[in-house]
Amino acid sequence: MKTSRFDKDELVTLISNWKFPSPFKTYQKRWEIETFFGCLKKRGFCFEDTHLTHIARIEKLICVLTIAFCWSYLVGEKKDAEAPIATKSHGRKAKSVFRYGFDELRRIFFGLRKKTKVFLKRLKLLTVNEQLGGCKKNVL
């Protein structure tokens, strides 16, 4: 059993029947995966509502949803830089970065005729190469 404090008031205890060299790093990775699938399901794309049964089709859907998740997250980061997400009284953000971007993309898609310029601006987040540490990063 390992215990650690991430914030001044949050105590995290991990219990396992396996010994890990760095259990909190392992748990953090696991939590990121759990959060990602949560966004694919109830917090965004309703993946659990699919009626697909063929593995190849499910894999393609997960691929498309992963790109949509990344785009939503990138839009959320950009929008948060332009207009920061409100912080609630308990110190946490009112929305996740993913949700902020997801909501922005939904608003754009539902009013696409009026928001073509904004759509193209947000689309560039998927196509523009950025210089990162000497390497070029291309999201797609």
Image (tube, helix red, strand yellow):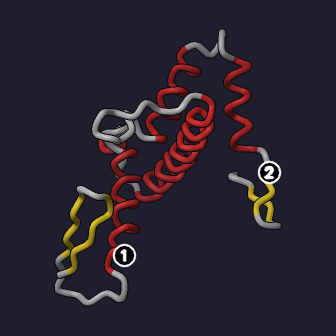
Nearer to the camera, 132 or 108: 132
Q: Tell me the tag on residue 79.
A: none
Residue drawn 27% across the image and 66% down it: 5
Type of amino acid at the residue the image marks with label 1 = Thr
* Relative horizontal placement of residue 46, taking residue 19 as reference (left or right): right
Residue 112 sits in quarter: top right
Residue drawn 43% across the image and 30% down it: 86
Picture layout, residue 6 above or below residue 62: below
Question: Is residue 38 visible from the viewing direction of this image?
Answer: yes
Residue 136 sits in quarter: bottom right
Residue drawn 51% across the image and 25% down it: 106
Nearer to the camera, 88 or 98: 88
- Write down the residue under mark 1: 26
Cα distance between the residues tagged 2 and 1: 31 Å
x and y percent of residue 135 in the render?
80, 66
- Name the outermost residue toward the front: 8
Q: Nearer the viewer, mark 2 or mark 1?
A: 1
* Relative horizontal placement of residue 38, taking residue 86 as reference (left or right): left
- Write down the residue under mark 2: 129
